[in-house]
Amino acid sequence: MPENLLEGLLFGTSKGGFTGAVDRPGLFEQADGGTLLLDELNTKPRDLQTKLLRVLQEGYIRRVGGTKDIPVDVRIIATINEDPEELLHQGLIRRDLFYRIAVIRIDIPPLRERKDDIVLLAEKFLEKYNEKYGRQAWLFSEKAKEKLLSYDYPGNVRELENIIMSALSMFEPNEHVVGEDDLVINRRKSLPAQDVYNLGDGGLDEYLAKIEREMIENALVSSGGNITKAAESLKIKRQTLQHKIRKYK
């Protein structure tokens, strides 16, 4: 999302501030007296982070194009999906903003490190998509549970939800038990060690293309299909990744 649109979403807009602008409260005004979640704080532009810091320190916002200071009282919950010390070192988060927000820090381990949560979450998603898709699947078979527990979920909880959503979308309305075969899990591929120097008939170009394709597939799975995040993890431009996705179909 362009920075100016994101700023208008958070702080609101004033009529006449720019072409097509109308008087509209932003999320900070709407959350006044309550709580606002800032998801993946490290993806926000630094100029916007500066404005967020000012709001937190001074307790008021000014709409885009406006001249009036509007007081707000909002509790902030912020999330980041990478190591905070590394993000600070890279300059992706302003230090003053981070320490202003990080009064209480909670580190949530990845799903693969909290196996006890997997079936509980899967059952919750089962309930959610039963209602959404009009299904009557009320439990997982033991084999299905074993399959869920054996996976390491590079995409964390979002990937688990996608797996359950996929299963329920293909379910028959009168089925009640989710079986092992109903769960489509795209396990990450790895190249056998003994094949490292076995280029085959295609030579080096084909071998490298195979590796590149598998890395792209893994990045897309890990990011839940989010191309921007996948590109960041691969350290390439988004447009480059889109080109390669088309290239490898």
Image (cartoon, rainbow, N blue to C red):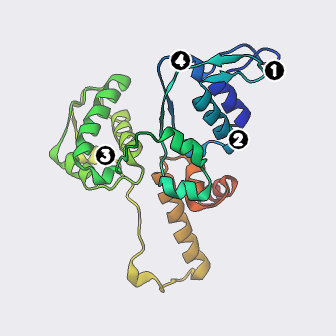
Depth check: 52 or 228 in front? 52
Which residue is the site of mark 2? 47
Q: Mark 4 — residue?
A: 32
Could you tell me how far apart the alpha carbons at marks 3 and 2 are, in whole angstroms? 44 Å
Q: Give the amino acid type for the residue marked by disc 3 in the picture.
A: Leu
The picture quadrant where one finds residue 60 is top right
Instruction: Please state which amino acid type lies under the numbered disc 4.
Output: Asp
- Nearest-to-viewer mark from 3 and 2: 2
Using residue 90 as the reference point, say whether residue 39 is left or right of it.
left
Label 1 crowding class (10 Å Cα cut-off): few <14, some 14-19, many 20+? Answer: some
Query: Left or right of 240: which side holds 33?
Result: left
* Badge 2 amino acid: Asp
Could you tell me how many numbered marks the image carries? 4
Dot 1 amino acid type: Gly
Q: Residues within 10 Å of mark 4 (few under 14, many from 20)?
A: some
Q: Residue 121, how many percent across, how many down?
A: 28, 38
User: How far apart are the two marked residues, 2 and 1, measured between alpha carbons?
Assistant: 19 Å
Q: Which residue is labeled 1 in the image?
A: 17
- Pick whichever of labels 4 and 2 is earlier in the sequence: 4
Q: Which residue is mark 3?
A: 183
From what the image shows, is residue 222 above or below residue 51?
below
Any part of residue 3 in sight: yes
Can see residue 249? no
Does the residue at mark 2 contact the one at mark 1 (Cβ under 8 Å)? Answer: no
SS type, badge 2: helix
Ranked by sequence position, the earlier of labels 4 and 1 is: 1
Give the position of the C terminus as an image quadrant: bottom right
- Residue beneath the point at 61% across and 61% down: 235
Please state which of the two labelled residues, at mark 2 or mark 1, is closer to the viewer. 2
